Image: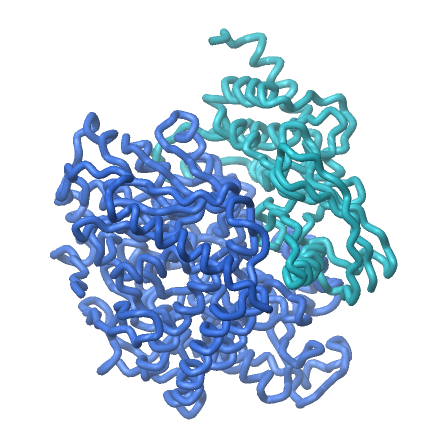
């Protein structure tokens, strides 16, 4: 597998600018001759589709939702980072770069992260120009708040709905192009496979969710911006339809899957309340600006929070990490919550919860101020739990949220398959082993507005014009037949369990053995159990209805089938990465105080997996990470 | 809790629909309305029946996909709440609940509780944007915007495009939806150059898609899960009038 990252020469700060100049261009009159397919219309996909269309390319965009505006980027709450340094508190591009590299526990590529930090400022400008209503000060200038893993205020926000507003910005750019006829928008169509011709990605196969029709779409280049795979845990903060299928299909066709074991468990979600639960709801990290996290000092203390006196409370983040306190990064905060609960000091009916308390902030700032900052989040919390967070502390617990791993890409965001580009959460590139808060929106829009619209044309200019291909090409026909075959296999099993049943079973295994803390024995156990569930699925799943109509059971079964194969890759990666770093915590590797112990000598690389067949152990390749500008350091937030 | 559901079943847009009765036992208070449907659907699948189709995705009240009319009200009686955020503790043991799709001629039923809302997409394509291509922006702080206007624009921008407004309106009007977008941009300097063009184009498309006009019934505001105010309709009407008088039609 060729894993040349194609990082441009030159000093770190000049790489992107040099590269922009060195990349090839296409004459405006020739651009419309190139077709680019964009799968997924969230921040990365929506922004890329709109921007490439603005440049004059012929774009086709796909979403399984009924509108591009419903992509799960919309649910991001807290904010987006940028190195504007408007508050004059010591921020800079270099600091955002360093914080992100350190936050990722030294497992991300220097050059990519530096570019992300550079571009961050353009994103804010672009969004404001589109009319995104960011929060402002009374002077009319943009307001900032703080997020985990940073000691500066660099997060821009729109109440607790930043993701929504940024997505609607990208969506507005996209609908403008749809209206102009430069983007053909396909809604309620799910990608079922990619198609390679002579080693190049030349299109995709989709399934129309309303008619069941399996269709081919030809292109000169394909961009996957299909999000993360957090739903492999069944319960997560992801939307119901979020799935790994697009990325996994690309992997099965030869694309490398990088660092799948880097899965982020978000510390502040509403705890599980019962078996009926279909998803977990995130409470924005921004709440930790003003909320204080604590558990009772004594095990099994069942008193109401208000009855527990100050000296019998353990503000464990403030105690263990005095310099970052409640704004410690997500991986660290999640593990600390788990530790407290495993120690028998958890709250909530299940014992798996910790308090997030606003009493001090309300006393200091007044209820109005808190309501202005977090009103919609408090409302959402009350609606779900029936508790009023203004008068009693919230209860929170970690949940699967974001996945740093994804398809391997080079500096140009192209996978090892020529023509197949990957943006946003679907690629692995910028967050290393742990993503900092407010960095996902930044990366999605950086990829979508600025990186892909430069690098995809470069690919087309360097490799095009391409041989004419039609939907009748045998590779398209073969891929279509495979999808139809999978559908009819699923429809014909007529077993005793629903697809959701198997998804839940898989989720239990993943959370138990490959969740917040992992070890060799557990991971090996998971590698025994997953194939059993998969086998049972193919023997005993039931899909009702027919395949020529809207069939939500079939949709779910198709997605679960891929999760059941992909989960094994994730566990293999967790097992082979015999170190603790960022979100990946191996209990065998920790300091006496319980902090993660990295092994830079053996694991300062990207683990990239190559498909070898279902149920067969995939091959592991390495992309060594070169650190020329930062030095490895123990990641301390104390 | 034991809940009786009277659910609209319709195989596809061409066929006639009808109400079908289901009894769901063991409904827990902490369940969301959609989680109750999950349980019912799991049961129907195991019985070999076609489960009830409904749109949903984020289940945290922001994507705007869910679209049930519950006891005659889009998203149900709970104020400022999407269907996915409606919890069963708001109902009583033994309740009978009528569940239908969002009702508007411009939103044809696709199957059961799923409707086609592409009419909203067309309205957005007609003018729901600021025409600024990527790469043209100046520094964000070169454009000061008063906090009051930014906050008001955000109130409008909170719209999730679910379609509850148009489905609750006796006239089938989408004016709350349209005015939220028009209002957001009208409050911001970025929206000024296209202000007249935008309001004319979006309303023209709204009418073309068969949505009615506003006669101040305020049902839309009551049904809106994001509490978008009808004041934006008043603002839009003024904008529309001004634009109609002073713009040469194409």
Q: In the image, is residue B33 above or below residue A343?
A: above
Residue A465 locus on image (x, y percent): 15, 37
- Quadrant for the N terminus of chain B, please: bottom right
Residue at 66%, 81% (x, y): give it.
A351
The quarter holding residue A125 reads top left
Residue at 55%, 63% (x, y): give it.
A494
Q: Nearer the viewer, residue A184 or A53?
A: A184
Q: In the image, is residue A325 above or below residue B155?
A: below
Residue at 58%, 86% (x, y): give it.
A342
One can see residue A325 in this view = no
Residue A585 locus on image (x, y percent): 41, 80
Q: Colour of chain A?
A: blue
Residue at 43%, 38% (x, y): give it.
A186
Residue A166 locus on image (x, y percent): 47, 44
Q: Nearer the viewer, residue A540 or A28?
A: A540
The quarter holding residue A586 reads bottom left
The chain coloured cyan in the image: B
Residue B177 locus on image (x, y percent): 62, 32
The quarter holding residue A47 reads top left
Tell me if B25 is positioned left or right of A620 in this view.
right
């Amino acid at each position: 597998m060729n894993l040349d990252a194609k990082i441009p020469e030159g000093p770190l700060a000049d790489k992107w600018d040099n590269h922009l100049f060195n990349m090839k261009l296409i004459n405006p009159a020739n651009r419309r001759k190139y077709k680019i397919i964009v799968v997924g219309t969230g921040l990365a996909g929506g922004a890329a589709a709109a921007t490439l269309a603005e440049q004059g390319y012929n774009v086709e965009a796909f979403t399984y939702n009924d509108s591009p505006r419903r992509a799960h980027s919309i649910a991001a709450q807290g904010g987006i980072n940028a190195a504007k340094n408007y508050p004059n508190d010591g921020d800079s591009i270099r600091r955002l770069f360093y914080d992100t590299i350190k936050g990722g526990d030294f497992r991300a590529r220097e050059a990519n992260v530096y570019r992300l930090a550079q571009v961050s400022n353009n994103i804010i400008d672009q969004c404001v120009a589109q009319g995104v209503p960011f929060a402002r000060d009374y002077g009319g200038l943009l307001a900032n708040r703080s997020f985990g893993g940073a000691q500066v205020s660099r997060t821009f926000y729109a109440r607790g709905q930043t993701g929504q507003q940024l997505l609607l910005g990208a969506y507005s750019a996209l609908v403008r192009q749809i209206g102009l006829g430069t983007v053909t928008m396909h809604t309620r169509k799910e990608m079922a496979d990619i198609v390679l011709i002579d080693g190049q990605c030349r299109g995709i196969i989709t399934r129309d969710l309303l008619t069941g029709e399996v269709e081919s779409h030809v292109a000169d280049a394909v961009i996957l911006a299909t999000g993360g795979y957090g739903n492999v845990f069944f319960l997560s903060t992801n939307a119901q339809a979020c799935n790994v299928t697009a990325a996994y299909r690309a992997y099965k066709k030869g694309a490398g899957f990088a660092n799948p074991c880097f899965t982020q468990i978000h510390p502040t979600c509403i705890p599980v309340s019962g078996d009926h639960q279909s998803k977990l709801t995130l409470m924005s990290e921004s709440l930790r600006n003003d909320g204080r996290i604590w558990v009772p000092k004594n095990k099994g203390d069942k008193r109401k929070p208000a009855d527990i006196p100050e000296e019998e409370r353990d503000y464990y983040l403030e105690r263990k990490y005095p310099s970052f306190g409640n704004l410690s990064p997500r991986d660290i905060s999640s593990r600390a919550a788990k530790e407290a609960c495993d120690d028998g000091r958890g709250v909530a009916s299940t014992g798996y919860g910790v308090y997030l308390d606003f009493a001090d902030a309300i006393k200091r700032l007044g209820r109005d101020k808190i309501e202005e900052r977090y009103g919609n989040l408090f409302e959402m919390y009350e609606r779900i739990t029936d508790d009023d967070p203004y008068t009693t502390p919230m209860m929170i617990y970690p949940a699967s949220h974001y996945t740093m791993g994804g398809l391997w890409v080079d500096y140009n965001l192209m996978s090892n398959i020529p023509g197949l580009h990957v943006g946003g959460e679907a690629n692995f590139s910028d967050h290393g082993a742990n993503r900092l808060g407010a960095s996902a929106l930044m990366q999605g829009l950086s990829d979508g507005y600025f990186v892909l619209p430069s690098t995809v044309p470069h690919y087309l200019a360097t490799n095009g014009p391409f041989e004419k291909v039609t939907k009748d090409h045998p590779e398209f026909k073969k891929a279509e037949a495979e999808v139809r075959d999978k559908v009819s296999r699923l429809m014909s099993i007529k077993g005793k369990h629903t697809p959701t049943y198997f998804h839940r079973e898989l989720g239990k295994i993943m959370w138990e053995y490959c969740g917040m803390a992992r070890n060799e024995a557990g991971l090996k156990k998971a590698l025994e159990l997953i194939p059993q569930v998969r086998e049972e699925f193919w023997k005993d799943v039931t899909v009702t209805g027919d395949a020529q109509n809207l069939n939500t059971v079939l949709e779910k079964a198709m997605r679960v089938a891929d999760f059941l194969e992909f989960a094994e890759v994730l566990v293999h990666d967790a097992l082979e990465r015999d170190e603790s770093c960022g979100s990946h915590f191996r209990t065998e590797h920790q300091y006496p105080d319980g902090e993660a112990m990295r092994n830079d000598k053996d694991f300062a690389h990207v683990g990239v997996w190559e498909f070898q067949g279902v149920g067969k152990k995939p091959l592991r390749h390495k992309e060594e990470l070169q650190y020329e500008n930062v030095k490895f350091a123990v990641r301390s937030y104390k | 809790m034991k809940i009786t559901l009277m659910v609209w079943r319709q195989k596809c847009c061409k066929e006639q629909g009808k109400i079908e009765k289901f009894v769901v036992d063991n409904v827990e208070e902490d369940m969301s309305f959609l989680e109750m449907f999950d349980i019912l659907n799991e049961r129907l699948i195991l019985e070999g029946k076609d489960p009830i189709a409904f749109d949903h995705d984020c289940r945290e009240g922001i994507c705007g996909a869910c679209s049930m009319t519950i006891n005659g009200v889009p998203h149900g009686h709970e104020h400022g709440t999407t269907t996915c955020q409606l919890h069963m503790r708001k109902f009583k043991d033994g309740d009978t609940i009528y569940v239908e799709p969002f009702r508007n001629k411009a939103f044809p039923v696709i199957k059961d509780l799923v409707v086609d809302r592409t009419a909203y997409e067309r309205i957005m394509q007609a003018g729901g944007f600021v025409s600024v291509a990527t790469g043209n922006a100046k520094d964000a702080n070169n454009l000061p915007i008063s906090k009051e206007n930014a906050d008001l624009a955000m109130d409008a921008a909170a719209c999730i495009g679910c379609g509850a407004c148009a489905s609750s309106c006796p006239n089938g009007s989408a004016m709350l939806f349209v005015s939220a977008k028009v209002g957001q941009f009208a409050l911001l300097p970025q929206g000024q150059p296209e202000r007249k063009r935008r309001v004319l184009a979006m309303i023209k498309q709204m009418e073309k898609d068969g949505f009615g006009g506003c006669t101040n019934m305020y049902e839309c505001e009551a049904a809106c899960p994001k509490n978008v105010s009808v004041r934006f309709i008043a603002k839009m009407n003024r904008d529309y009038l001004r634009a109609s008088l002073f713009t040469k039609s194409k």
